[in-house]
Image (cartoon, grey):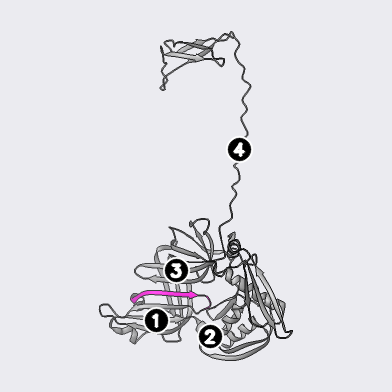
Amino acid sequence: MAADQTKPNYSVTVDGALIKDDLIAALIQITVDEPLDQASMCAIRFRDEGAVLSSDHPFKVGADLEIGLGYVGAPVTNVFKGQVTGHKGAFARRSNPTFTVLGHDRFHLLRRNRRSKTFLKLKDSDAIKKVAQEAGLSAKVDATPLTQEAIFQFNQTDADFILERAAMFGYETWVEGKELRSRPPDLSAAAVATLTWHEQLRHFETRISLANQHPELTTQAWSMMEKKLITATAKKGQERSLMGGTESGAKFAGDVFKKDVQLRATVPARTQDEVQAYAEARFRQQSEAFLLGEGTCEGDPKIRRGTVVEIEEVGDHLAGPYYVRRATHTLMVESGYTTSFRVLRTAVKRPAVSIPNPERPPPHVLPDYEAPSESEPLNFEVGEPGGAPLGGAPFVVVDPSGERQDGELSSDGKVEVEFQE
């Protein structure tokens, strides 16, 4: 059975059990907001006639909470796994009271305490894993390129420490279920959805800015060991991906500002490779702020943070793949399901497509024309459009040399003409 796009469907699970029919009947709205580098959150709003729900409900703080969204006729797709973190009650003067359940994914566990720690001879990715594991999370972290002599967590929450270390290499971080993930943005991933203007795509707007775009970025750091300045450069062509475009922010900046080099100082460093890694990460982060956009489409649970969507029918300058930095799913029981998103792109303008010439049939060669001899007259038969002979009509015939003959057609529309050389 194919999914019915006019009938949204959902599932809400608390501590592994689906909510009961009385809660389903009272449900008004589900909202799931999932950004990168932050905790995702959800809000589930119910009618609460007589304040019954606010007095007795299964949504205990700390309970496991899962939400699935989709359409009738197809399985729902999980868009939230986290915990109940709070409740809201609303008692308006001229409407029914409502009860709202609030939830966050387990990224919120990383913000509960501040710590001061030192990590010796570790990669930043390994330090991130250790902090996540101590907070009760498993970790899937792409390896960072450098082994540090010492990494300091100074009076920071675990979340702030992880985000700081990840950002130094241009990584993005989030929690999926009970697993912390940190990696470079996967800008070249296959699109999970194609959104066409006036079809699935209801609203889309973009902003292109050269505010932090430079054709070249030079990073400097002071070596405490060697007592000297270390310099590294990243430039146009070192973007993570052009995402199907041909004109990047670095190219635009180079065309407009010519020899425009950004100079940036960073934390003390030990080696050239370390400063080079910081320079490339910073250059790539800035390139990913060149084109930012936001839009709304028909609800699609496949559109998640860290995925790619294809935007079509918005002109070749802007059409193409976009990377989703934030996705917000809103299901209104009485009015439908929509997905809003915030996206980025590193370049614009699709490459020109060369259209091959269609195969042409071989030319049709006519046999050589043999002119009639002088003794052979030319015979003509003239008729009306319906086919009846046009008898008695006047005629004029002029040969290639300019000789002219005229007269009247015979009753059957025929005439015989002979030209003299």
Q: What residue appears at the point 45 percent right and 63 percent down from the top-left corner? A: 204
Q: What is the span of residues highlighted in magenta in the rendered image?
A: 26-37
Q: For mark 3, does the 10 Å Cα neighbourhood hold few (<14), some (14 to 19), or many (20 or more) residues?
A: many
As drawn, 110 above or below 350: below
The residue pinned by badge 2 equals 110
Q: For mark 1, does the 10 Å Cα neighbourhood hold few (<14), some (14 to 19), or many (20 or more) residues?
A: many
Q: At numbered mark 3, what does the secondary structure look like: helix, strand or loop?
A: strand
Foreground residue among 71 and 238: 238
Looking at the image, is mark 1 or mark 3 earlier in the sequence? 1
As drawn, 412 above or below 151: above
Q: CA distance from mark 2 to mark 4?
A: 68 Å
Name the amino acid, label 3: Ser
Q: Looking at the rendering, which quadrant does residue 18 occupy? A: bottom left
Give the farthest residue toward the bottom: 116
The x, y position of residue 86, in whole percent, is 41, 85
Q: Is residue 35 magenta?
A: yes
The residue pinned by badge 3 equals 340
